[in-house]
Amino acid sequence: MKSLYSKDSILITIMREIKLNVIPNPESNTKTILEGGIELGNGPYFQGQGGDDSTNYLCGNCNHVLGERLEENAQICDIVVKCLKCQSYNELNTVI
């Protein structure tokens, strides 16, 4: 996260953002897939407590936030998340 000051001395915070890789719909039983339900609404799937080093993870197709304010040491790996907005499949294949 980057903090900037405007000309009126107002603190503006810029969150680090990472676009995920979009993949084709995975074959059955090959990947763990998270698909939103009514309780998620528009998401995100993951929400952290995020401080200065937090990151937002975005759909690689439409930039919808799928993971919000995740800390640097968050461990979410080897899953696919289906975007709640555009329905594309996004891969998380490393520890984030």
Image: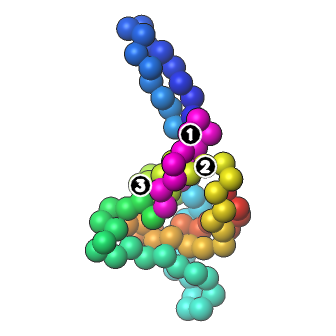
Name the residue at the top extreme: 7
Q: Position of residue 82 (x, y in %)?
A: 46, 71
Q: Which amino acid type corresponds to the residue marked 1 in the rendered image?
A: Gly
Q: Earlier in the sequence, mark 3 or mark 1?
A: 1
Q: Position of residue 24 (x, y in %)?
A: 54, 76
| Residue indicated by mark 2 | 71
Q: Earlier in the sequence, mark 2 or mark 1?
A: 1
Query: Which range of residues does the magenta coloring cover?
Result: 46-59
Mark closer to the observer (3, 1): 1
Q: Position of residue 8 (x, y in %)?
A: 38, 8
Q: Which residue is at 31% across, 72% downward?
A: 39
Residue 23 drawn in magenta: no
Q: Is residue 56 visible?
A: no
CA gap, disc 3 and disc 1: 21 Å
Name the residue at the front extreme: 49
Instruction: Classify mark 1: residues with Cα within 10 Å, few (<14), some (14-19) or many (20+).
Output: few
Q: Quadrant of the C terminus?
A: bottom right
Q: Quadrant of the N terminus?
A: top right
Q: Classify mark 2: helix, strand or loop.
A: loop
CA gap, disc 2 and disc 1: 7 Å
Q: Are marks 2 and 1 in contact (CB under 8 Å)?
A: yes
Q: Nearer the viewer, residue 49 or 40?
A: 49
Q: Nearer the viewer, residue 35 or 89?
A: 35
| Residue indicated by mark 3 | 64
Q: Which amino acid type corresponds to the residue marked 3 in the rendered image?
A: His
CA gap, disc 2 and disc 3: 19 Å
| Residue indicated by mark 1 | 51
Instruction: Classify mark 2: residues with Cα within 10 Å, few (<14), some (14-19) or many (20+).
Output: some
Q: Which amino acid type corresponds to the residue marked 2 in the rendered image?
A: Glu
